[in-house]
Image: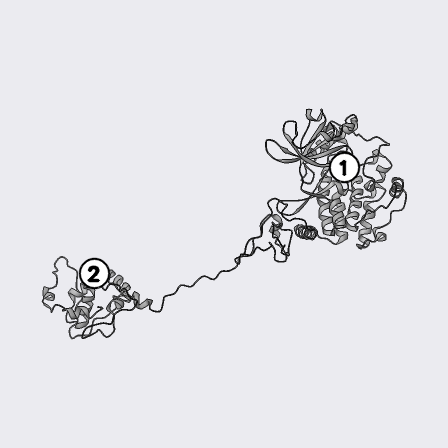
Amino acid sequence: MSTEKIQPGLVIAGRYRIVKQLGEGGVGAVYLVQHVHTDERLALKVLHNETLSDPSTIERFRTEARAPARIDSDHIVRVTDADVAPELNGAPFLVMEFLRGRDLSGEAEARQKLHPKEVVLYLRQAARALDKAHAIGIVHRDLKPENIFLTVREDGTPCVKLLDFGIAKLTGGAASAMGAHSKTKTGAVFGTPLYMAPEQARAQAQLIGPPTDVWAIGLIAARLLLGFDYWQAETISDLVVQIVVDPIPPPSQKGSPFGPRFDAWFLRCCNRDASQRFRTAGEAITELAAALGIVEGPALVLEVTEILQKAHAAEGAPKSTVAGAPMPLAQNDGVARPAFASTPQPENPMALTPMGGGAISPQTAMGATVLAASTAVPVAQTGSPPNASSSKAPIFAAIAIALIGVVGAAVMFGAKDRGEAPKNEAAAAEAAPLPLPTPTPKAPVGAEPPAKVEPAAAVSVEPAAAPPPASAKPAAPPLPPGPGRTKPAPTVTTKKKPNDDDLMSGRR
C-alpha cells in the first residue's frame, strides 16, 4: 500500500490509529500511532510497496522485528508487535516503543561535538547491548550515530538505545533460533559507507563478526569527539579506497586534542586486521575511558546528566518534555527556584530535571528527588503580658485551695492558740477568692491586712511546709477519727466567729 494513503485516523489491524508520519526512508515509513484500547503511543513501521516483492527485504524486516526480543537489553529499542494488515494490502508492519529525544547524529549536528564524558557514557551503554547481541550470534553491522538514539529516563539520566537491526547478520544459534539463515552472500555490500569496515567494503561476508561493530565504534567516537566525519571523500570510490587501501591517519593529524593515547586507541579499533581489534565492544570502551582519563561509575552519570541539561538549555530546548521530571519546590518567600542552586533561572520557570545545576547528590542519579532546601522559620515565643501573674493569681489560689481543701479543713478544726494568722487561713479556706474581671486585683480592705502575705499563694507553693506560729504550747496535729478516738472537742465552735471585716481582710 502506498504510504500516501496512510492518513491520520486510519486504524491498522483494528488496534493502531495513525496520528502522524514521523519519517520515511528507502524501504519504508514510520508513523506515530495510538493503541485504540490502551491509548499508549507507539511507532509503527511499514514497508513501501516496491520492496514487498524482494524476499531479502522481507527477511530483513522479520529480523528487525525478532532480534531485539532475542537480545533483551535495556539499550535496544523494544518491539511490541509485528503482523500484516488488510488496511496495508497485506503489507507487513512492526510496532516499536515511541522514543522521545533524538539520535546521536542529530545531537552532534546541533552541538557540533560532544563532551568526552558523554561519549564514554553513551558508548558504554551501546556496548552493553552489542556484547549481548554478539554473545548470541547477532552482529549489527550498521552501527552509526543515526542508529544510536539518545533519550532520557524518568529520573533525568540519559539512556541510549540501538535501532535498526534490519541488516543484522545472524550466525550460529541465532540463525537457527529465529528460523533464518545468513542473508549476506559474497559480493553483497550492506552497511553505511562512512562506518563500514574493510571486510564489509570488500564484501567478505565470511569475515564479518563482532570486530565489524568494534570498527564502527571507533569511527563513531571520533565523529562525536572531533565534530566531523573521519573519512573525507567526494565519491564512494574514494571512500572505499580510504577505508581499504590508504594508510589510516591518527586522529592527531586531523586536529584531535586528546593526545597519543587516543590515537593508539583509535588505530586499534580501526585496524584493518580484524583480529587486532578489541575483542569486545565493552573492552573497547574501557580502553577509551582510560585514554581520555575518564573514571566510569555513578559520578560519571551525574556529570553527564548535568552536561546534557546545560547543553540543551543553551539550545533553548524546553525542559518540560520529560514525563515525571522533578519540579522546583517553592521556598518560603513564594519564589520558584531551580532544583539546584547553580542552575540559571529561566524567564518562565518550567519543569526541571536533575540534569541542570551544580553539584548534586549520588541518590539523585538513583531516583531520589532532591528537595529544595527548607528555610528555617522562627517560632513565635509565647510570653505573659506584664500583669498576667497578678491577674491570674486568684485563679491559681482557687486551684490550690481546691486541692488542699481537706488539709485546710483539718488545720482549721484542729488548730489551737494559733493567733490571727490561722484565722485568716481558715477564712481563706472557707471562702475561695474568685478571679476578678480586671487584670489588677483590688487593694486589700480591712483594718489589719495580713502584711502582704497571700495565704493561698503560700499554700500553693509549699502547703505542707508552712510551720505553725510559735506559742507556749504547740498544738498537736489532729488525728483522724477512729476506734478509740473521738473528734476534737467542739470548743472550736465556741471561738469567736469571724466577722465581716475578718472575712474581707484576706482578698476582698
Using residue 401 as the reference point, say whether residue 234 is left or right of it.
right
Is residue 388 visible in the rendered image? The answer is yes
How far across and how far down the image is residue 291, in percent?
A: 77, 52
Residue drawn 73% across the image and 42% down it: 148
Residue that badge 2 annotates = 406
Amino acid residing under circle 2: Val
How far across and how far down the image is residue 465, in percent?
A: 26, 68
Instruction: Give the mark count.
Output: 2
Q: How crowded is mark 1: few (under 14 residues within 10 Å), some or many (20 or more)?
A: many
Residue 207 quadrant? top right
Using residue 392 as the reference point, say whether residue 237 is left or right of it.
right
Quadrant of the rendering where the C terminus is positioned: bottom left
Is residue 85 visible in the rendered image? The answer is no
Is 87 placed above or below 361 here?
above
Q: Nearer the viewer, residue 92 or 423?
A: 92
Residue that badge 1 annotates = 140
The answer to which of marks 2 and 1 sits earlier in the sequence is: 1
Amino acid residing under circle 1: His
Q: Nearer the viewer, residue 26 or 270?
A: 26
Which is closer to the viewer, label 2 or label 1? 1
